[in-house]
Amino acid sequence: MAYKLLKESALKSHLFNFNEGRPTLDNFHHFYSYLFIEFDKFWLECEPRDIMEFNRIRDLFENNIRSQLEDTRTLFKVNIEVDTV
């Protein structure tokens, strides 16, 4: 999904806002890490019956990301919460 968004130029607003200059490979690494973490949260929130719902949930998630990318101020940041035992 990250690569597809990059190839389609849908990722331009995030990359520009992330660095305000020339995008780097690290910027792309941050983005796909963000997608991985947020998709995991989204998957759990959807409470799928089984893995057969993957395509439907992935499509919903991608549509949400695309909607956010339409805003030129979009900037995705990883906010990791660390639980202590």
Image: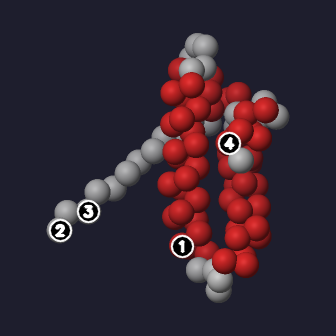
* 58 over 26 or under it: above or below: below
Q: Estimate the spatial distance between the alpha carbons at disc 4 and disc 1, rounded to whole Å.
A: 20 Å
CB-based contact (under 8 Å), mark 3 and mark 4: no
**Which amino acid is tagged 4?**
Ala
Residue placed at 79% from the left, 32% from the top?
7
Residue placed at 59% from the left, 80% from the top?
47
CB-based contact (under 8 Å), mark 4 and mark 1: no
For disc 4, the neighbor class at 10 Å (few under 14, some 14 to 19, many from 20) is some
**Which amino acid is tagged 1?**
Leu
* 12 over 78 or under it: above or below: above
Q: Secondary structure at mark 1?
A: helix
Q: In front of the other: label 3 or label 4?
A: 4
Residue 42 at what x, y percent from top left? 58, 65
Q: Estimate the spatial distance between the alpha carbons at disc 2 and disc 4, rounded to whole Å.
A: 33 Å
Residue at far right of view: 8
**Which amino acid is tagged 2?**
Val
Residue 43 at what x, y percent from top left? 59, 69
**Which amino acid is tagged 3?**
Asp
Q: Secondary structure at mark 2?
A: loop
Residue 55 at what x, y percent from top left? 76, 67
* 56 over 18 or under it: above or below: below
Mark identifier at residue 85: 2
Q: Secondary structure at mark 3?
A: loop
Q: Estimate the spatial distance between the alpha carbons at disc 3 and disc 2, rounded to whole Å.
A: 7 Å
Residue at far bottom of view: 49
For disc 1, the neighbor class at 10 Å (few under 14, some 14 to 19, many from 20) is few
Residue 14 at what x, y percent from top left? 62, 32
The disc, 1 or 3, on the residue closer to the chain's N-terminal end is: 1
Residue at far left of view: 85
In which quarter of the view is residue 15 placed? top right
Quarter of the image containing the C terminus? bottom left
